[in-house]
Amino acid sequence: MEKPATPELVLEAGRASRHYWADLWRYRELLGFLAWRDIKVRYKQTTLGVLWALIQPAVTLAVFTFIFGKLAGMPAGHVPYPLLVLCGLLPWQLFAAAFSNASGSLVANTHLISKIYFPRLIVPLSSVAVALIDFGVVLVLLTTLCVWWQFMPDWRVLLLPLFVVLTLLTAIGTGLWLTALTVKYRDFRFVVPFLLQVGLFLSPVGFSSTNLPNWRFIYSLNPMVGAIDGFRWCLLHGEPALDPVNLGVSVAMSALLLVSGLWYFRRTERTFADII
């Protein structure tokens, strides 16, 4: 006697695309679980723990202060030069960590992508949580230096969350492009560190964007220019002055990256399970 055929469950990519954004909310607990898992893995079995989040910006701060402040003699106005650099490093570290984590998140979770259905956008979004933890640690370092130099922020610090959001949206937009491309072309894993190295020097981290008055508008096409300028404006008593036009250019570029990143991610999402 023949055994009855075992019913098969077929998971079709994009089947629930009509309710995709509702599913994104419905799977919010999975997002929280993945974020918490990444945080625990980040610092598990490490001797220094979260202090690793301080080592890199501290070393970079010392190098940039020596190169741009001492050797190049870059002006810093009425602000202590280390504070100027650290206020640039703060958003850059947030962007770099969120971008790097998001760009490799799908490949790092192949066991989930190939077995169960959930909105794949949850994976790169959850990877941003670690970047926020590191951001909080570096913010403590900045607060300590502000107390040391008696240079505490004024009312402008209340607007700082807006520029944190701008930084995260820029990181997510670029991260969605890279994570989708990395699934198909694994060579992009080697492109991410290169982009971050180049971007560090193409962004006004070690100097103020006001040092490039003739190129500031074009320079603002880099969305991190607006984010870094905004951080400094909020934390350094409005120095350097924030140009609304240049800030608008950076915000527009960040929005373009986010919208195009979402579009490309959703377009290629149907093929992730097959390729991975």
Image: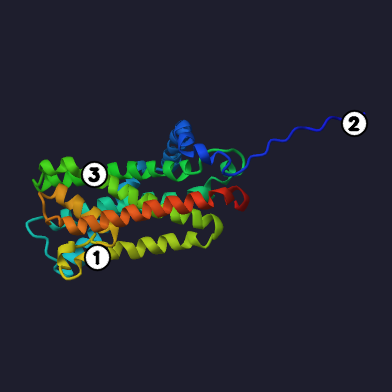
x and y, in percent, of residue 148 in the image: 12, 46
Sequence-first tag of 3 and 2: 2
In this figure, which residue is indicated by the disc labeled 1? 219
Q: What residue type is labelled 1?
A: Tyr
The first of marks 1 and 2 along the sequence is: 2
Q: How many labels does the image show?
A: 3
- In contact (CB < 8 Å): disc 3 and disc 1: no
Residue labelled with disc 3: 162
* Mark 1 surroundings within 10 Å by alpha-carbon count, few (fewer than 14), some (14 through 19), many (20 or more): many
Identify the residue at the far front of this view: 18
Q: In which quarter of the image is residue 208?
A: bottom left
In this picture, residue 171 sits left or right of residue 228? right
Residue that badge 2 annotates = 2
Is residue 99 in view from this perspective? no
Residue 156 visible to the viewer = yes
Which residue is rendered at x = 49% and y = 61% of the image? Answer: 188
The residues bearing labels 3 and 1 have C-alpha atoms spaced at a distance of: 21 Å
**Could you say which is closer to the camera, residue 138 or residue 88?**
88
Mark 3 → mark 2, Cα distance in angstroms: 66 Å
Quadrant of res 140: top left
Residue type at mark 3 is Leu
Q: Which residue is drawn at 47% across and 44% down?
A: 121
| Residue 244 vertical position relative to residue 146 in the rendered view, above or below | below
Image x and y of residue 266, in percent = 49, 49
Which residue reaches farthest left? 78
At mark 2, the secondary structure is loop
- For badge 2, the amino acid type reads Glu
Residue 63: percent from left, percent from top: 25, 62
- Give the residue at x 30% y 61%: 200
**Residues under numbered marks 1 and 2 in contact, where contact means CB atoms less than 8 Å apart:** no
- 218 relative to 269 in the view: left or right: left
